[in-house]
Structure formats: C-alpha cells, structure tokens
Amino acid sequence: MDWLQVLNQLSSVVCATLIGIVAGVAIGYLLLPSFIYGRKPRKRR
C-alpha cells in the first residue's frame, strides 16, 4: 500500500470523526436547553 493512500484514509477518517464530534456537541448544546426547559413545569401560577 502507498503511504499517500494510507495518509489520505487516515486524514479522511480523522476529519470525519472531528466533524461528527463537533456536530454531536453542537446538537447536544442545542437540544439540552429544550429538554431542561421542557421538563420544568412552566405553569407555576
């Protein structure tokens, strides 16, 4: 196997994992407030 192909595959895998982690963290930060506010009863009156 050529080193260039191995480096290309490794870089693509690393980029994909980084993008997945960043997307997961962003989605988690976006969804956590909705879950927290959704579980809290707003009707306290």
Image (cartoon, grey):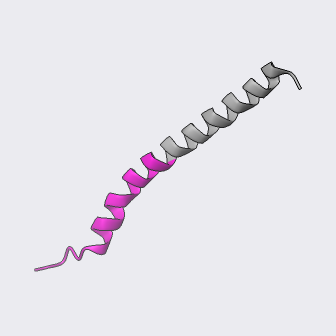
Q: Which residue lies furthest to the right in this view?
A: 1
| Residue toward you, 10 or 22 | 10
Q: Is the magenta stretch mostly helix, strand or loop?
A: helix
Residue 39 at x, y = what percent?
31, 74
| Residue toward you, 33 or 6 | 6
Residue found 73% across the figure and 25% down from its top: 7
The image quadrant where one finds the N terminus is top right
Residue 30 at x, y = what percent?
38, 52
Tell me where the magenta segment starts and ends, as one range. 24-45
Residue 27 at x, y = what percent?
45, 50
Total tally of numbered discs in the picture: 0
Q: Residue furthest bottom?
A: 45
Residue found 10% across the figure and 80% down from its top: 45
> Residue 2 in magenta?
no
| Residue toward you, 34 or 19 | 19
| Residue toward you, 1 or 11 | 1
9 horizontally vs 2: left or right:
left
Residue found 34% across the figure and 61% down from its top: 34
28 horizontally vs 13: left or right:
left
